[in-house]
Image (spheres, rainbow, N blue to C red):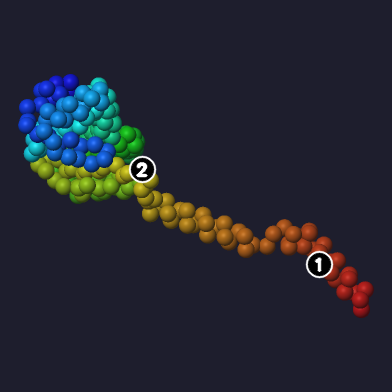
Amino acid sequence: MKFQYRVNEQIRAREVRVVSDGGAEVIPTRKALEQAHYEGLDLVEISPNAQPPVCRIIDYSKFLYQQKKRQKEIKQKQVKQDVKEIRFGPQTDEHDYQFKLKHAQEFLNDGNKVRAYVFFRGRSILFKEQGEVLLLRFANDLEELAKVEQLPKLEGKKMFLYLSPKKSGTTKKSQQRRDREEAENNAKAESKKEPTALDNGIFGNAKNGVDALAKLKKE
């Protein structure tokens, strides 16, 4: 980066556009150099292909530090996203399925994409519908963490399903989970409507007895 920019006498253009917080002006390069030297700073060419070249009067060491810091911030924002593979057979048993489902959840939580596929060996291609059902189930079980980029598609002897992680904060509840929560809320609402121990049983009978006795006294 130190040799990426022309500085001071390295700038060959006859005139330059000097930018500052106050705006920009086109002046002869010699005048810009004199101004930079007068301020104890450097004339740095930041856009050599412009007509005329764009320069800034700044401390060159400070300028390089700012550029390195900016590049570092940009690099940190660039999330590296790998594609992880999950392989199934057309007749994968439940234990193996759950094991691979757990791995897929870990991959998605780490921000990676998942490419799941069913490999059909020999005559097992006859079970391609079974493989499709398996991949659709896989996508459904991961819908809280992932969105489908490509539905199951047969390519040669492999049927692929592509999933990518959902952004943080946009996780959507599965239909099964929504139904379960709705049922629980309905059960709670019904329990509130049911008579309590104070209305029934010993306490309820006692209350009724007191009311009846008070009524008899009035009569």
In which image quadrant can residue 85 be found?
Answer: top left
Vertical side of 155 occupied by 2: above or below: above
- State the separation of the CA atoms marked 1 and 2: 58 Å
Q: Is label 2 in a helix, a strand or a loop? A: loop
In which image quadrant can residue 78 be found?
Answer: top left
Query: What residue is at 22 percent from the left and 39 percent from the top?
Result: 115
Query: What residue is at 57 percent from the left and 57 percent from the top?
Result: 188
Amino acid at circle 2: Ser
Q: Position of residue 27 (x, y in %)?
A: 13, 36
Vertical side of 85 occupied by 167: above or below: below
Q: Nearer the viewer, residue 55 or 198?
A: 55
Query: What residue is at 15 percent from the left and 24 percent from the top?
Result: 8
Q: Nearer the viewer, residue 207 or 70?
A: 70
Query: What residue is at 78 percent from the left and 59 percent from the top?
Result: 203
Q: Position of residue 146 (x, y in %)?
A: 30, 44
Q: Is label 1 in a helix, a strand or a loop? A: helix
Q: Residues within 10 Å of mark 1 (few under 14, many from 20)?
A: some
Amino acid at circle 1: Asn
Does residue 36 show up? yes
In which quadrant of the rendered image does the C terminus lie?
bottom right
Does residue 44 show up? no
Q: Position of residue 76 (x, y in %)?
A: 28, 31
In which quadrant of the rendered image does the N terminus lie?
top left
In the image: residue 81, left or right of residue 30: right
Which residue is disc 1 drawn over?
208
**Which residue is the extreme one toward the bottom?**
219
In the image: residue 142, left or right of residue 202: left
Please tell me which of labels 1 and 2 falls first in the chain: 2
Which residue is disc 2 drawn over?
168
Tell me the mark number nearer the camera, choosing from 1 and 2.
2
